[in-house]
Amino acid sequence: MQRRSFILAAAGASGFAVAPAVLRKHAAASQPAGFRVRYYPVQEGAGSRDVTPGPDGTIWYCCQRDGHLGRLDPRDGSYRLVPLGSGAAPHGVVIGPDGAPWVTEGGQNVIARVDPSDHKVTLFPLPDGTARGNLNTGVFDKRGTYWFTGQNGLYGRLDPRTGKTEVWGAPRGRGPYGITVTPNGQVWYASLAGNYIGRIDTDTAQVEVVDPPTPRQGARRVWTDSKSRLWVSEWNSGNVSVYNPADRSWKVWRLPGERPRCYSVYVDERDMVWLTDFGANAILRFDPNTEGFLSFPSDRRNANVRQMDGRPGEAWGGESGTNRLVVIASPTTT
């Protein structure tokens, strides 16, 4: 499969946008003590969603509505925009072993790589004849292979060394969504419509299906902790659950509130579990040791924070409904 590449103009030219942003601190009484919440406005109409921190301290974010990959500098709130191509609608972004952001680009049905130095965009189309996959999320395994999901019922892999992509039909058809790689090297994904999590054998590409204990729970996102346990955000049930592949055990907790809608999950370096709850319009922090939740409600309606990510001491998210990024800094003693 051929790859397609293009390179953007220098900063300030038509193909590459540079824009300032106004940082906004939030210290409302409703926020848990000791934590600091800060918002970063980005361009209007961006639909700023999945985020990931770059190795240089910047934050990459997907602009699903306007077809860009954004790069925020938290030091001054400025951001730059990289257009990904005609009809682009990026969904998920991760940093590869090469230090570059790799994007599941559903609008063009491709995987996109953006060079962090000159913002050259390289597109890796799915194999010829592959139907539109509604590409969702990607992750790199321990061998440097990029695995990805498509909500229209597929999962696949890309070898960055050769540019070859392969795809397979997912068990139960539609639904593959979030994906993660554990410290012991296993690749797992969650199927929203299929109501399961699945382990991909990275040698054979076969999938082992594991059903959570709650029927029709809507497993949407999955993230590993340091012990290779799988934390799952359950969209339909409003639960967060954890699966331990070592003993095949499950534990389940319902999010607080009357009608929780648990969209995403991210586990930080302390094994604290961060969740986004569309029902409460909030980010939650769950402590597995105390089994307690802390809530960080947005100061605007319909924030709709998508997939979170972070770096030591900071949990980041994209408010797709307000065109902002948000960061929650944890107390150093927490």
Image (cartoon, grey):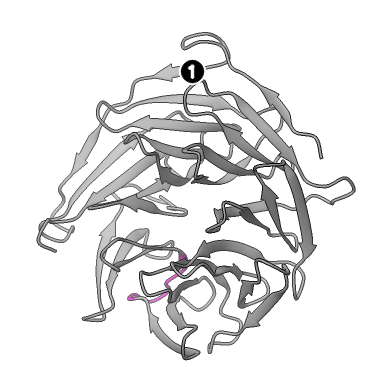
Question: Can residue 210 be found in the magenta stretch?
Answer: no
Q: Position of residue 286 (x, y in %)?
A: 29, 71
- Is disc 1 placed on a helix, strand or loop? strand
The residue located at (58%, 40%) in the rendering is 64
Question: Can residue 257 be found in the magenta stretch?
Answer: yes
> In the rendered structure, which segment of residues is drawn in magenta?
256-263
Residue 138 in sight: yes
Q: Position of residue 90 (x, y in %)?
A: 60, 41
Q: Amino acid at mark 1?
A: Ala
Taking depth in this image into account, of 67 and 92 the one nearest to the observer is 92
Taking depth in this image into account, of 238 and 16 the one nearest to the observer is 16
For the stretch drawn in magenta, the main secondary structure is loop
Number of other residues with Cα within 10 Å of mark 1, as a class: few under 14, some 14 to 19, many 20 or more: some
The residue located at (59%, 87%) in the rendering is 215
Residue 108 in sight: no
Which corner quadrant holds the C terminus?
bottom left
In the displayed structure, would residue 83 be above or below residue 17?
Answer: below
Quarter location, residue 55? top left
Q: Is residue 138 left or right of residue 169?
A: left
